[in-house]
Amino acid sequence: MLLSSAKLALQDAIEASPLPDDPELQRNLSEYFPAPMRQAYKKQIDNHRLRRDIIATDLANRIVNRLGLIHPYELAEEESVGLAEVASAFVAAERLFDVREIWEELDEAAMPEATRLILFDRAASAMRIQMADVLRISNGFRMPSDVVDELGRGVQKLSTGTEKLLADESLVLTTRLQREFASAGAPEKLAAKVTHLFDLDGAVGLADLAKRTEIDPRKLTNAFTILGQDLGLAWAQGTAALMSPSDVWERLLVAGLARDFQQMRLEFLQRLTRRKGMKDNPCETVNAWLDENAGAIRQFRSMITRARAHTPVAPAMLAQIASQARNVLSR
């Protein structure tokens, strides 16, 4: 009953939105019919009078089947959006990061079933991160095809050579995930694909900022990484992302903080575009700012050091760090 109700609520929200009319979902309509019918009756399928209903039903099923019951509804609550926006973000993230192909491989690869469930769970968590970023750059409902057209090239550029762009904390998480998957008996290449989805955390926001500022996305990402590493914000973001409090209000708090530690860096980099030389060499510009504010940064880093030494890290500590980080980055 719960599973059916979750899907029906999503389906109703999708049908009431422009989403079923997006060209990105043509594949969902076609694949709803048996393969022998797709070519012979392509015109009839494309113009089916239940076209929107079929797409909404198929998409709602995919979202719940792939992400589970909780993620879509938590995202709607955390980002203050409707279920139609969540569904649109799902389609955009799935296309931007080729997640549909990863899920198909997870369905078919030979591995212990318990391991398959672990990989599905991790892939869903990574998708939730990417969907949250799509929601934040969208500022309301946006067609997935528009998001993919605008950001696809930038995301693709960031998806290669990722290890050279990651902060140390991100590399630690990647290594830990790879070991976890390997010890569970996951195929090496498939485990690497799932892990890579976590490596690309922030790619959506960076690709969006790169497009708006006309700065090379890899140069921008290097500056983003330097800022996160030197201030300790990469650690704070990673810590918040791994928290799973039982209290609903603390859960909302840490979910918001995980995205805020990323968003405040993106907004800071956008403000730096006013400085001469930022477009050509963002890393040099960020390093110059770090030198100019060395005293304030040392004081902020001492708070980060105290927080890192405290086990476990409490949500309230991260909230205070976020407040102080905004003060430092406003200089």
Image (cartoon, rainbow, N blue to C red):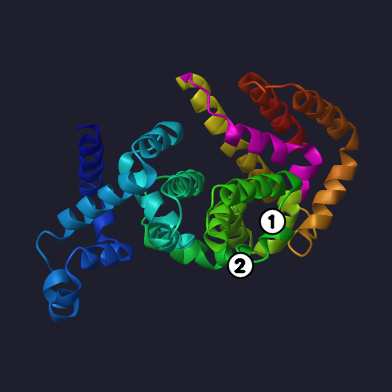
Which of 118 and 29 lies nearest the eye of the viewer? 118
Residue 36, quarter of picture: bottom left
Left or right, 241 with respect to 166, comes to: left
- Residue 97 part of the magenta segment: no
Residue receiving disc 2: 157
Indicate whether 159 appears above or below 15: below
Q: Amino acid at mark 2?
A: Lys
Q: Where is residue 39 drawn, in percent x and y? A: 18, 80
Q: Is residue 225 visible?
A: yes
Label the magenta part by its dominant secondary structure.
helix
Give the residue drawn at x 61%, y 67%.
157
Q: Where is residue 252 drawn, in percent x and y? A: 49, 27
Q: Is residue 215 visible?
A: no
**Tally of marks:** 2
Which of pointers 2 and 1 lies earlier in the amino acid sequence?
A: 2
User: Where does the magenta region start and end?
Assistant: 226-247
Give the residue drawn at x 71%, y 37%.
235
Label 1 residue SS: helix
Q: CA distance from mark 2 to mark 1?
A: 11 Å
Q: Amino acid at mark 1?
A: Thr
Near mark 1 (Cα within 10 A), the count class, few <14, some 14-19 or many ≥20, is many
Q: Where is residue 146 drawn, in percent x and y? A: 41, 61
Image quadrant holding the N terminus, namely: top left
Residue 26, quarter of picture: bottom left
Left or right, 108 with respect to 49, comes to: right
Give the residue drawn at x 58%, y 53%.
195
Residue receiving disc 1: 221
Near mark 2 (Cα within 10 A), the count class, few <14, some 14-19 or many ≥20, is some
- Residue 231 part of the magenta segment: yes
Give the residue drawn at x 20%, y 51%.
57
Indicate whether 5 appears above or below 91: above
